[in-house]
Amino acid sequence: MNKPYYTEYEKRYQAVFSAGVERWGHSPEDEVLYQTLKTWVEENDLKGKSIIEFACGEGACGAILSKLGCSYYGVDISPSAIAKSRKLLEKYPNAKVEVLDMVKDRVNGKYDAALDCMGLHMLVTDSDRQGYLRNAFQALKEGAPMLLFRESYREEGVYNEVV
């Protein structure tokens, strides 16, 4: 059976980490990311609520959302990224992460909000994007917001929110 092209991100994480790089993705200290998530949490009254992040990578958003008082669940296709994320999030009791193929696999439960921080653009086929968005939609409670952060490359700092 052929593996989907997007599983290659595991090899990329392994290569980066084996080269001694601490973080390939976002940092919890990224001020634009922090301010965007803080505003999103405040505007959508998400403090104390459950947020799922697709393509969570190394957990930067999970750390920020946990500090902001949210209950966090992150999923990613890469076991290496999830291992880094677990280490970063171990001090937050309301944060958990696990390996999940967000194109093919559905998550259990319904969440108050969803986040994607540069994950959707890594899916290059329409069928993969449709599967991902279908799974994201089914994971949300009715009327829940989904933030697609840095998916628009037209303007720096612009984010897109789907309600």
Image (cartoon, grey):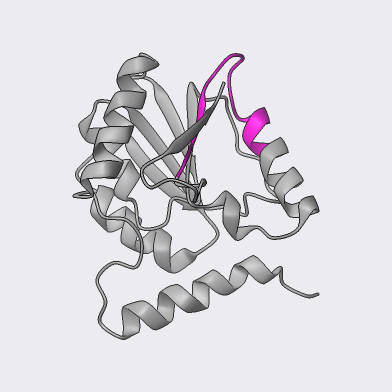
Assess whether residue 145 is covered by the magenta stretch. Answer: yes
Q: Nearer the viewer, residue 82 or 26?
A: 26
Image quadrant assignment for residue 77: bottom right
Indicate left or right for 107 with 87 as reference: right
- The reply to whether the magenta stretch includes residue 86 is no
Question: Which quarter of the image is occupied by the N terminus?
Answer: bottom right
* Residue 123 in the figure: left or right of residue 146: right
Span of residues in magenta: 135-149
149 displayed left or right of 3:
left
Q: Is residue 47 visible?
A: no
In the rendered image, residue 162, in percent from the top left (x then y), is placed at 57, 27
Question: Is residue 48 shown above or below 139?
Answer: above
Against 26, is 160 above or below?
above
Residue at figure coordinates x 68%, y 51% from the top left: 103
Q: Residue at x 63, y 66 (%)?
A: 6
In front: 82, or 158?
158
Residue 109 location (% of width, % of height): 58, 28
Q: How many marks?
A: 0
x, y percent for residue 120: 59, 50
Query: For the point 43% across and 73% down, which residue is it?
Result: 13
Picture layout, residue 154 above or below residue 113? below
Q: Quadrant of residue 23?
A: bottom left
Q: Residue at x 62, y 14 (%)?
A: 142
